[in-house]
Structure formats: C-alpha cells, structure tokens
Image (cartoon, rainbow, N blue to C red):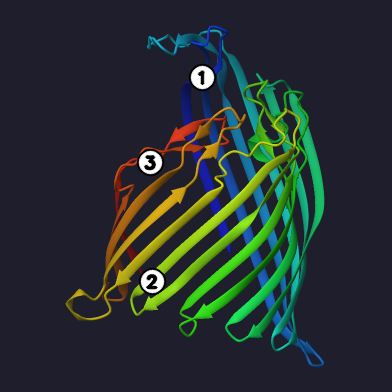
Amino acid sequence: MFRYHFREFNVEEISGGTVADDNRTLNRSYQQQENKLNQFNLITDVTGNFSTGPIDHTLLLGLDLRWETEDWTGQFGPADPIDIFNPIYGAPIPTDLTDFEIESETNWVGIYLQDQISLLDNLILLLGGRLDFVNSSLFTVGGFGDLDNRVEDTAFSPRVGIVYRPVEPVSLYVSYSESFLPVSGFSAGLTFEGEPFKPETGQQFEIGAKAEFLNGRLVTTLALYNLTKQNITTDDPNNPGFQIQTGEQRSRGIEFDVIGEIIPGLNLIASYAYTDAEITEDNSDREGLRPENTPEHAGSLWLTYAFQQGSLEGLGLGAGVFAASRIDGSDGTFFLPGYATVDLATWYGFSAGASDVRLQLNIKNLFDADYYRATSSRGFNRPGDPFTVIGSVSVTF
C-alpha cells in the first residue's frame, strides 16, 4: 500500500491566553502562519504458510517506510487584551511582531515479523515483534530561537498472544504488546529549553472473549485491558506555544461490542466502553487527574436496514445514538457535561452499466443537542457539531 498526503494552509488569528488578576481581562496573542506538509508512506508485507511436523505456521514479514517534511513560516506577538465581560472587538493587528521559520524532516523504517502458530486445532499462539529506526531533524530560526536538533531512535516492540477455543463459536484470548511512537514534525524539539522530546512508549495487556451467534452472523466481543503510556506530549502551561511531556498515563477498562446481521438486511452495531484513566506521573502537578478527552462511560448503537427485494431493493435506512459521560478538564477544576446525539442515514444504490452508484444522505445531531468536546490542541474546549446534513454520491468502477 502506498499513500501520499499533502497539506497547505494559511492562518491568521488572535487567541486567548492567561486571565489577569482582576479575573476579567484576557491577555491575547496574534499569530500569522503558513504551513506546508508532505507525507509518503509505503507498507508492504509477505505472508507464507508452512509446517514443522504437526504444527502449522502462518508467517508474516512486513516493511513500513515513512518520510515526512513540514515547513512553517510566519509571525507572532502580543495583541491587545480584551474584557471578557464587556468585549470591544476590532483591535488593530499588532506591529511589534517576531518572525519565525520552522523546518522538520522525519525518516522512519519499520520491520515487523509475526508467526501465527497452530499448536492444536483449538489453540493458536501468536509471536511477533517490530523493529523501528527513526531519524528526525528540526531547524528553527527566529521567534523560537535558533535550533538544530537531530534525533535518532531505535526500538524493538514485542507482541505475544494466545487464543483458545473451548467450543467452536467461542474464543478466549490473552495478549501483551508494546508500542513506540517518536515525537516528530512540528512538535519535535519545541520545549521551552529547545530540547528534543523522548519517544512515546506504551505497554498493553488485554484479556477477552469472542462469541459468534446465528451461524456466525452476529459477533460479540468482551475485552478487559490495562494500557500504560510514557512521555505523552501536552501543552506547556507556563510557556504558551511550547510543549512538555507529562510522564506517564494509565488507562484500564472494559470494552464490549456487538456487530452483525440479526435478520437478512437488518444490521446492528453496538459498543460500550468503561475507561478508568489517570495521570500517574507528571511534572506539572497533575498526578491523579484524568487525561483530557477521556469520558468514564461511552457507548453507541446503530441499526441499519437494507431492503432485499421488490421495488425498494437498493434502499437503506439507518439510525444511531452516541452517548458519553462528563469529561474532566485538564487541570481538574472544571468538567464538560455528558451528552448524547442522534444520527440518521438513508441511501440508495443501483447499477449503471459497469459501475455501482450510491446516493447517500446523513443527518448528524438530529435534535441539535448542545455539547462540548475537549481537545489537547492548545487546551481548547470546542462546541460539538450542530444539526448537520451531508449529501454524497459515490461511484465504484
């Protein structure tokens, strides 16, 4: 698989910062920037089957190549403050601005190997691992200081699992895996001191069960997991525009999913997740708090029906609901309330010569519910999407 992604955009904005001691004057900053991003990704793998005596093997060997460049240029500086209770808009663009220029490049090579070993007809062992080589560089001139950071990281991430089927429609499994993610691109090296970040690492232990019903048309999955991540990058509360690494976060919980066809044409997708998340180590006094954007309870339910025959064949209808409990704020002093939204969908598919055509209409947030979503991007809490109608046409050759 080969994928190329590019992006170009210009931004000019005045954003809020700290609040003065009078609890009504909001300090602000101005920023104008241009961004260009290019990403190339090539993933290829080879699968082979062989046996060692009575034991069957499915061997997977893969290569993951990535290359990314990103350029930023622009200006920033302080803007006039504003009274949040009596705002007067239309302040002039600041003239005392600082120019900046940022260039980053990342080269990433990943090699992975996995062996699926059928020890018995109902017992499968999975052994695998991935070796990553990453070379990244960051050059800055101007406002963020003159930096020339070059970082090389190498990591091995193992993966092991076992699946046991006590009876044909039921599978029990347990797995352990590790992850490795270098901090690259615009964020690389942007500490206030100009030091490069450490790669984000993680360890996950999971145990679960999978069961099939209705002759395999309906599948249910129940999983219990414990996930720990180190060196997670977040905004620096003491130095706006820069970032820090929080130390360690731990998430553990339960996930339950039901997917399948209840009767011909009627499909169900249901999920529920309970997440117990906590910042376990931190260098900014946030230990014991929940990470951003992690509700304790979240779930969704979708039902779709596609007419199978007659004059309505090709027509489909769908309805769903998504709900989430409250989300704690980043500093533990506030929270965003829980919410639920309802979505609808309808589509019609037909053949036109050698092509298949699909007309679709989606309605999101049917009842125009007010809700907010926390984001890790500069600590903003954004309103959720209002009542929205989206139409689409797709043609498959």
Q: Which residue lies at the image location 47% right of the left edge and 70% below the top edge?
A: 259
Total marks in image: 3
Identity, as a three-letter code, of the amino acid under mark 1 = Gly
Nearer the N terminus, badge 2 or badge 3? Answer: 2
Q: To which residue does mark 3 refer?
A: 385
- Whole-percent x, y for residue 218 in the image: 47, 76
Quarter of the N terminus within the rendering: bottom right
Outermost residue, left direction? Answer: 311
Q: Where residue 155 sits in the image (x, y, percent)? A: 81, 53
Q: Residue at x 70, y 29 (%)?
A: 190
Q: Mark 2, residues whose alpha carbon is within 10 Å: few (<14), some, or many (≥20)?
A: some
For disc 1, the neighbor class at 10 Å (few under 14, some 14 to 19, many from 20) is some
Q: What residue do we see at 55% from left, 63% from top?
A: 256
Mark 2 falls on what kind of element?
Answer: strand
Q: Quadrant of the C terminus?
A: bottom left
Callout in the foreground (2, 3)? 2
Which of 298/354 is in front?
298
Evaluate if marks 3 and 1 touch, with contact meaning CB atoms under 8 Å apart: no
Q: Residues within 10 Å of mark 3 (few under 14, many from 20)?
A: some
Mark 3 or mark 1: whose residue is earlier in sequence = 1
Residue nearest the viewer, comparing 386 with 197: 386
Residue type, label 2: Asn
Q: Secondary structure at mark 3?
A: loop
Residue 255, percent from left and from top: 58, 60
Residue 16, labelled with which disc?
1
Q: Nearer the viewer, residue 94 or 238?
A: 238
Q: Residue 125 appears in which quarter of the rendering?
A: bottom right
Q: Nearer the viewer, residue 16 or 19?
A: 19
Amino acid type, residue under disc 3 in the picture: Asp
Left or right side of 115 for 81: left
Quickly name the residue at label 2.
Answer: 267
Q: How far apart in space, not on screen, are marks 3 and 1 (Cα)?
A: 22 Å
